[in-house]
Image: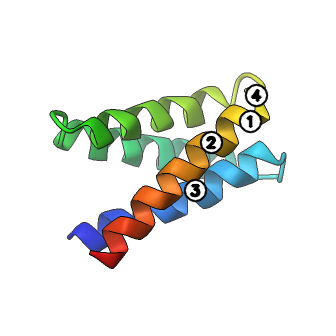
Amino acid sequence: MVKTLGILDIFAVIVLLSVSFDVDTPKGLVIITAALLCLKGSIFIFDIASIFDIGVGILLFLSLFMTLPLLLLLIVAAVLGFKGILSLAL
């Protein structure tokens, strides 16, 4: 189960980077990824990493309607990617 959630984190990083660099990403894919991250975060709500997942989901959703700073998105993608790699390694 933990490895599946790590794969979701890695997939979310790919979607987040594609949104960051203005790659033509389907809006449905961004919405589904944001919803899955928020759902995953709400299941384990008492963990700081889960609160981070909810924040990333909200950022992904907001990126559909406004241009967010590239540095912010890159930092969030790096942290989420590190979290995903760690969950795959453990």
- Identify the residue at horizontal 82%, vertical 52% (top origin): 24
**Quadrant housing residue 90:** bottom left
Badge 4 is on which residue? Answer: 69
For marks 2 and 4, the one nearer the N-term is 4
Q: Which residue is mark 2?
A: 75
At label 4, the amino acid type is Pro
Asked if labels 4 and 1 touch by Cβ distance under 8 angstroms, the answer is yes
Q: Earlier in the sequence, mark 4 or mark 3?
A: 3
Depth order, front residue of 61/59 = 59
Would you call the spot at circle 4 few (<14 residues within 10 Å), some (14-19), or many (20 or more)?
few
Measure the C-alpha gap from mark 2 to mark 4: 10 Å
If you read the primary sequence from the N terminus, does the residue marked by circle 1 or circle 3 appear first?
3
Label 1–label 2 contact, CB within 8 A: yes
Residue 35 at x, y percent in the picture: 42, 41
Find numbered disc 1 in the image and state the secondary structure of the residue it sits on: helix
CA gap between label 4 and label 3 equals: 16 Å
Instruction: Identify the residue at the far top of this view.
Output: 66
Label 1 neighbourhood size at 10 Å, few (<14), some (14-19), many (20+)?
Answer: few
Q: Whole-Å distance between the Cαs marked 1 and 2?
A: 6 Å
In depth, the one of 39 and 89 nearer the eye is 89
Residue under label 1: 71
- Residue 16, percent from left and from top: 64, 49
Disc 2 residue crowd, few under 14, some 14–19, many 20+, Cα 10 Å = few
In the rendering, which numbered label is found on residue 13? Answer: 3
Q: Nearer the viewer, mark 1 or mark 4?
A: 1
User: Residue 39 location in percent, x, y?
Assistant: 30, 42
Disc on the earlier residue, 3 or 2: 3
Residue 87 position by quadrant:
bottom left
